[in-house]
Image (tube, rainbow, N blue to C red):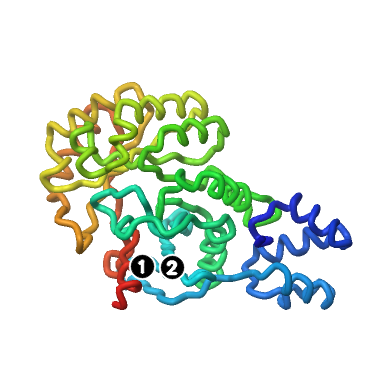
Amino acid sequence: MNLKSQTLAELAALFKEMGEPAFRAKQVYKWLHSGVRTYDEMTNLPQSLRGKLTENYPINAPEVVRKQESQRDGTIKYLWKLSDGNCVETVLMRYHYGNTVCISTEVGCRMGCAFCASTIGGLVRRLEPFEMLDQVLFTQVDSGLPVSHIVLMGIGEPLDNFDHVMRFLELVNSEDGMNISMRHISLSTCGLVPKIDELAKRKLQISLAISLHGPNDAIRDRIMPVNKAYPIDELLSACRRYYDATSRRIHFEYAMIDGVNDSEENARELLRRLKGLPAHVNMIPLNHVEESPLKPSSRKAVAQFQKILEDGGVTATVRRTLGGDIDASCGQLRRKYTQGR
């Protein structure tokens, strides 16, 4: 058991079993959520307790194996080695409103999207709550930059690791921990309909982003295997139920892929699909993946696609490309590292 995956209440119960005073649990909880690497750093604990915790509950902090900083925009990408030797990526992005950390939720991914490097090689394992929390904590510690926003859009499908992700959200939102507001957290899913419904029941104030990337089943089937299990009409119905339950506008991510999903007719069909749903379309210039034949759309196609959506009453923005000079797209750095490059 890793203590950092425990809530304060669970930690208090454990310390009671250990015969320790209740206030020790809160002390340890705050230390763990400040980014310490050893119990010896917890200077207000007795040495005997530090020794007991070290022996029974290792902290297992991640190790930076690669760190790349963009000379263009200051984006920092980390490749972390976990205690079992597996690696995951985290990206720190700087915006006018604060610093955002994009974290991974799994080692690898089983969703098989054609445009994503994260899924090459499949799913290795799901991350524990503390391993997600560590990405935020140690990115903040290493960079010296305070983190105010989190996006769960790195390696892995967050809703495929539902229980651990829900626990992570509870921990990172804790007033005695990092205390990051749910409204400053975005979760991206490729469209696991039953899990979207389960998430809706929790009525969290996070932002939900749907990786749509196509206006119809034919296109989504081609580039996103998950669509064969949960077709687009079923997915959008789940989005409407989510909005009804939470009153939170839904963001739709749309990677612009040359000759695949970027025609004017594709834009008009997308407009029809989203009619009546409070939505924002985040158009993403496709990042090149060596193993994929897919290419990014032209600037002209992107501009025309955006105009059709906005003229039809759907807000659409083109995502600013960050970290293009440091392999900042999901899965690229991990893949190079595992291939010995």
Q: Earlier in the sequence, mark 1 or mark 2?
A: 2
**Residue 167 placement, left or right of 93:** right
Image vertical order of residue 290 relative to residue 182, above or below: below
Q: Are marks 1 and 2 in contact (CB under 8 Å)?
A: yes
Q: Can the viewer see residue 336 in this picture?
A: yes
Residue at 24% x, 28% y is 271
Residue at 40% x, 37% y is 192
Image vertical order of residue 310 relative to residue 32, above or below: above
Q: Quadrant of residue 309?
A: top left
**Residue 176 placement, left or right of 91:** right
The three-letter code of the residue at mark 1 reads Arg
Res. 87 mark = 2
- Look at mark 1 in the image and give the residue it sits on: 334
Q: Nearer the viewer, residue 73 or 6?
A: 6
Q: Nearer the viewer, residue 172 or 130?
A: 130
- Where does residue 223 sit, x and y in percent of width and height? 22, 44
